[in-house]
Amino acid sequence: MKQKNLITIVTDHELTADTIARAIGANEKHEGYYLGNGYAVTWTNGGVIEATFSPSENFVLSTTMNSRQVYAHNFKFAMRDYDELVGYKKTEQDRKQLATIKALWGMSHTVVNAMSPERYGDFDFLNLYYFIAVPVAVRRAWLPILTKGAIRHGVIHGPQNRREYEEWLDNEIYNHLVEKSQEDSEIKGAYVMEEMPVEVAAAQAESIGIEPPEAGAVLTMNKNAMRITDSQPLLNMPLMLLKAAVELDFDHIKTMQTAYALYAKKLISYPMVKQNYIPVEIWRQMIRNRETLRFNRKWGKYVRGKAVSGRHNFDGCMNPYYGFGIVTTGLHPTDLTREEENLYNLIVKRVLEAFTPGRTLRNRKDKERRCRRGQNRRRK
């Protein structure tokens, strides 16, 4: 029997794979993967395996099965055909990359799931696991931040709190199964809590002709909860899309691509999130990380003292695996494109506002922009 002497790390995108490979010393670049130091690092190019619920079969939920086995029993797995969807022939490229992943998988005693740190990353990996159908030990590297220390810890040790992660994943799998089977459920997960600035809530309420909610109000719908706040919350993806469109004239695709590049360059936390609270351990890190922002050319002068607001900590019922607001990582940026620098500065501004109670940061260009808007309103 051929000895399995590799640890293979699987992530979503080549850009992330490159960052992970450099952090763990896998410096040999091959077609479809990196190799070195006992590791192979490869990528899927997105969610290439599709899980189709089997409605013709009875929904199976057995007390003798764990959540992953229940998931495997109730779905069928096949390579997704993107050709018609994206307008070019991607299927052949995906088939070739899957062959590379399967070959590395067969030479590995452990496979590390380093897919995106959200529920869809775990589902994408489960789909891949059951499609390849080669049993192997699996470890989850939960990487909302791609610093070298975070990558090495995640790859070697797995999640910070393994029990909490497993409970979260079990809950997500069962919720997904219940949704697909259209059955009434009592095992719905915790609310995903985010904050909405009171001025945004007021504008939305005005657009549909209702009374605006007051600061402190909590609005709930399905599994989401929105707390109205008169403070400046951390950015999440929806709010960042809005701010980048207004302040930078970025379309949504440009914002998402630029944000992911900043994440891969280890400068911000994982940006594709709905949540804009942060867990306690990240709040503690921000005491140190915020010091780096003193060197930011645009907003560094506004870093005052060492006090950090506790406003964005998770409530006791919140689970950090639901994601957290976009924060900086404590690394100083170098070699950024103009678009990356502009979006990074937008995030830096909101981080400083969020961790400095009662502050709204403005510079000369902000004042000029407000003046132009005021003049335009008067002309109308």
Image (cartoon, rainbow, N blue to C red):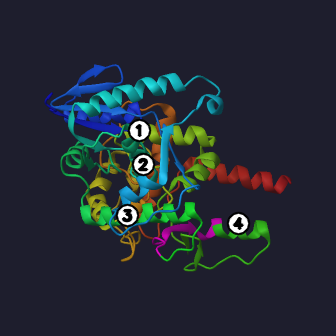
Could you tell whether 197 is left or right of 139 in the image? Answer: right
Q: Which mark is residue 185?
A: none
Magenta-span inclusion, residue 336: no
User: Which secondary structure, mark 3?
Assistant: helix
Residue type at numbered disc 1: Asp
Residue 212 pos. (x, y %) = 69, 76
Residue type at numbered disc 3: Asp
| Residue 11 image-quadrant placement | top left
Question: Sequence-wise, which precedes: disc 3 or disc 2?
Answer: 2
- In the picture of the structure, the residue carrying the numbered disc 4 is 204
Give the CA distance from mark 3 to mark 1: 22 Å
Magenta-span inclusion, residue 193: yes
- In the picture of the structure, the residue carrying the numbered disc 2 is 121
Asked if marks 3 and 2 touch (Cβ < 8 Å), the reply is no
Asked if marks 3 and 4 touch (Cβ < 8 Å), the reply is no
Could you tell whether 207 is left or right of 125 in the image? Answer: right
Residue located farthest toward the right when viewing the structure as drawn: 380
User: Which secondary structure, mark 2?
Assistant: helix
Residue 291 pos. (x, y %) = 29, 54
Q: Nearer the viewer, residue 300 or 97?
A: 97
Q: Can residue 322 be seen here?
A: yes
Q: Is residue 262 above or below residue 29?
A: below
The segment highlighted magenta reads: 187-200
- In the picture of the structure, the residue carrying the numbered disc 1 is 12
Answer few, some or many: residues within 10 Å of disc 4's Cα (few below 14, many 20 plus, some between 14 and 19). Answer: some
Q: Quadrant of the N terminus?
A: top left
- In the picture of the structure, the residue carrying the numbered disc 3 is 170
Q: Nearer the viewer, residue 352 or 202?
A: 202
Question: Sequence-wise, which precedes: disc 4 or disc 2?
Answer: 2
Answer few, some or many: residues within 10 Å of disc 1's Cα (few below 14, many 20 plus, some between 14 and 19). Answer: many
